[in-house]
Amino acid sequence: LSTENNMRRALEHEEFVLHYQPVINLTTGRIEGAEALLRWPQSDARPISPAEFIPVAEDTGLIVPLGEWVLQKACEQAKAWQALQPGLRMAVNLSARQLRQKNLVGMIEGVLASSGLAPNLLELELTEGMLVDNVEETLATLGRLEDMGIRIAIDDFGTGYSSLSYLKRFPIHTLKIDRSFVRDISDDPDDAALVTAIIFMARSLKLQVTAEGVETEEQADFLRSLACDQVQGFHFDRPLPALEFSSRLEKKM
Ligand code: G
Ligand code: G
Ligand code: MN
Ligand code: NA
């Protein structure tokens, strides 16, 4: 309960911040996108992890106004960064509760209109589990988002228990390979086989594929040899405060 009250106050006082992790094209090395990641700095302690406060926000419904704040901020930032990197895409994590939110599509329309960001530069990240419940309603929601030109990514791909048939049923554009598969690709033949299979499947289905959690040059080389489209990970960049991300774009490094 105290977390809930603190979160309400933090939202009112704009204490949350977004960090942005660069999404890198593995062939060119260029930054093609950013994933917005919520941070809650504390004046007298380490920041509280979203892994801790997002579940509370979901349970209390606070994720609805918090999620709208995240989307608005991320879209405004993406719009501003178009001057430095035309076509830069912004990925925003969506929680299950937001997908059930009645006015989600209208809220997103409003944010795109007020920020001026082109819809095809916004990618919403969902997890597999979110596609299992209320299938008809979710299909309708995602269909409307796709009609607007918004892209849908499956986050943590491979860790859910759902049937792969959803890849055919839902309008999905990107698979983000979970970092648990990427971690041991250089040493574990099973993980290497799984990642290879996911990348080949994605290509056959004409989906874009992003590998997450790339921490070493060996992992990057392996993924490059499979022509994986994009990567994220500490080997390239940590999630960065907006100003650092801007310098990173300006230096074109
Ligand atoms: O960035 P970090 O590893 O601390 O994130 C932990 C988890 O919190 C990840 O699963 C990430 O997807 C989630 N997360 C981070 N920011 C947001 C956000 O703005 N909205 C939602 N729903 N989840 C987020
Ligand atoms: O669930 P999701 O993919 O949204 O989680 C994103 C989280 O992964 C962020 O909190 C980010 O800090 C973390 N992350 C990003 N790159 C790496 C990496 O290379 N290694 C590890 N261990 N975590 C990472
Ligand atoms: Mn994510
Ligand atoms: Na992930």
Image (cartoon, helix red, strand yellow):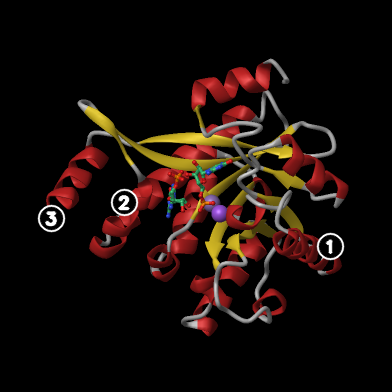
Nearer to us in this view, 116 or 38: 38
Which residue type carries mark 2?
Glu
Q: Do the residues labelled 2 and 1 touch (CB within 8 Å)?
A: no
Residue matched to label 2: 52
Query: SS of the residue at dot 2?
Result: helix
Residue drawn 66% across the image and 22% down it: 249
Q: Nearer the viewer, residue 110 or 36?
A: 36
- Quick one: label 1, few (<14), some, or many (20+) residues within 10 Å? some
The residue that disc 3 covers is: 1
Marked residue nearer the N-terminal end (1 or 3) = 3
If you read the primary sequence from the N terminus, does the residue marked by circle 2 or circle 1 appear first? 2
Q: Is mark 1 on a helix, strand or loop?
A: helix
Query: Badges 2 and 3: C-beta atoms under 8 Å apart?
Result: no
Residue 30, image x and y in percent?
76, 31
Examine the rendered structure and indicate whether residue 236 appears above or below residue 54.
above
Q: Name the residue under label 1.
A: 203
Q: Residue at x 56, y 57 (%)?
A: 125
What SS does tag 3 mark?
loop
Mark 2 neighbour class, 10 Å CA radius: few under 14, some 14 to 19, many 20 or more: few
Give the image location of residue 90, x and y in percent: 60, 43
Location of the C terminus by quadrant is top right
Which three-letter amino acid code belongs to the residue tagged 1?
A: Arg
